Amino acid sequence: MNSKIFILLSIIAISSFSCQIDPYLSSVYTDETIWEYPDMVEGLVGKPYDYMSRNYNDNVGAILDGATDNAVMTSATNVMAKLATGSLVISQDPFSTYWNNAYKAIYSVNLFLKDRKGFNTRFVLIPAQDLQIRNRLQGEAFALRAWFEWDLLQKFGGKDVNGEMKGFPIVLEPLDITKKIDLARNSYDECVKQIVDDCDSAYKYLPIAHRDFLVTGSLTYAGSKYWGRMDGITTRAIKALVYLNWASPRFNSGGNIERWDSCAKYAKQVIDFKLNDKSAGKGFTTYLNRVNWFDLNFEGIIFSSRGSANDAMERMFYPGGFSGNGTMGATQELVDAFGMKDGYPLNQSPTIVFDPKNPYLNRDPRFYSIIFYNNLTINGGNPNTVGMYTFENWENGGKDAMNVSSTNSNTNYYIKKFVSSTVNFKNSPVNTQPHSKFFIRWAHMCLAFAEAANHVGGPNNTKYGLTPKAAISYLRQRKTYDNATGITVDPYLDKVASLGETAFDAFIKNERRIETCFEGTWFFDLRRWSTTLSELNKPVHGVKIVKNADNTFTYDFTYEVQKRQFSSAYLPIPYDDILNMSKLTQNEGWDSWK
């Protein structure tokens, strides 16, 4: 790109991770002159973080679950509702911005990496500290390119109209893809190799993790001030996720077992680092404690966005009756994924009988920290606040029932995950809490390892020092998001592990659903596991509730909320780029987008 404008915008909008820049610099600085100004060079690596999500309230976070069997969007005109029902049109493409942002980020780091100009820039006078900065920035540049390449592959990788499994156009030079540059998509396998290579290149330069107690030199140039930036252990985690996708049925028609093995290997490296290495978080000894969505330094984070105090998730998930927007509702399918408190699935417990007249009693303890259900009263986390809000989801007079308001869920369930119990809209001012997006968590690595290692050797086979059964046990016995005791006595885990690979794979998928719902990953999980559209095109359900004269309730769990009509298992390549690049092929199933 002849990028005076791009460089200027990059500098002006430098992320808070970057050094401060003189705000009065003008557009006289180009790709050629920027190298005279070290702060601007550093900004090339800082800027890509601005292209990452900051919270779960976007189209690649919780809202993406509205195009899965986990949730239904309240508004029929929402783009995810249109995607789910087969009525999305070109002008509404919710994913093109992520394609564009990825290539903007890749342009920025490619400019830094080209001819090692970034690495050869002198940032400070003291040689040892200068090398520390240069190594970190060089490693970050490779890692960021790998991150955005992985983002492109996960979102846009798929079988094209020619029947070939494609990824994205690999760009290793500072090219502006919005210009007339005719690029072709590389094969899926080539894209995997590029991401893995970039992760390995990054690993050579980066510290293993950004924590103060890792640092032997000056904290001015290293340490936890860089928490939230790419580090070495994040590159191992990215590789695990890439191999997990590549090993899955949709992208592994030949059943290559080595891909599963590679996923298990790298996921286990991340697990071990957190568990055993004192540099990981002074020893991840509290892994059984809850995931704290409001602690931006939570030890279970591998990589996360920057955060800020806000009430975005509470506004998004609460119904209109409690100053929310009721943007989406959980499905009955997701609710049924939660078994009973002894760890057995619904209707399989030898000791607890599921009562359809009191369906939310004695459920898996994790259920209560993820779903708001009928007649539940919440107290705002304050023992002195009695009855902050009660959910009235019955259709004969309940204020939170579907169709009563445009801000009420269509499923008669509401979502609790990411919602802070201390946010009370009856207070003035509202006590907002920190929110960010935990892109990769320790739990994700446990799930990846369990799935991959199970395919290699079965549930009870030790792989890299751990069994799939043990990896899942970590998660089931952990405290819930509400700090309640998890499933500490778990006979069902023993039972299902004894049934072999196939049964345990289905069990892992259900555990993954419970653990990752509304994090923006389930959409891609369903696709990587599926081989036909019929597996995706199933109706989703809610619950119809009637309040009886004696104040009991009658529940109908068969209420069909929405039929799903996906024409493709893949997302579309942005239409504008299809028009601009004759070599760029569209994914199958998007005939009107070619």
Image (spheres, grey):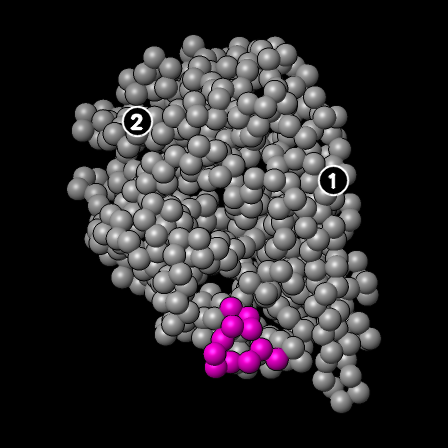
The answer to whether 159 is drawn above or below residue 220 in the figure is: above
Q: Quadrant of residue 552?
A: bottom right
Principal SS element in the magenta part?
A: loop
Where does the image place residue 406, in percent across and percent down from the top left? 79, 58
Where does the image place residue 348, in percent across and percent down from the top left? 51, 72
Q: Which of the pair 47/476 is nearer the observer?
A: 476
What SS does tag 1 mark?
loop
- Considering every residue shown, the one lying at the far bottom of the view is 550
The amino acid at mark 1 is Gly
The answer to whether 175 is drawn above or below residue 519 in the figure is: above
Q: Quadrant of residue 534?
A: top right
The answer to whether 173 is drawn above or below residue 229 in the figure is: above
Label 2 belongs to which residue? 201
Whether residue 346 is visible here, answered yes or no, is: yes
Q: Which residues are magenta?
A: 345-355
Where does the image place residue 572, in percent across and percent down from the top left? 64, 30
The amino acid at mark 2 is Ser
**Does the magenta-highlighted stretch encompass residue 139?**
no
* Residue in the image at 48% along x and 33% along y: 253
* Other-residue count near label 1 (Cα within 10 Å), few / some / many at <14 / 14–19 / ≥20: some
Left or right of 171 on screen, residue 473: left
Q: Which of the pair 589/182 is nearer the observer?
A: 589
* Residue in the image at 68% along x and 16% along y: 579
**Does the magenta-highlighted stretch encompass residue 346?**
yes
Tell me the number on the disc at residue 86.
1
Q: Earlier in the sequence, mark 1 or mark 2?
A: 1
How many angstroms separate mark 1 from mark 2 (CA)?
A: 41 Å
Where does the image place residue 430, in percent across and percent down from the top left? 60, 64
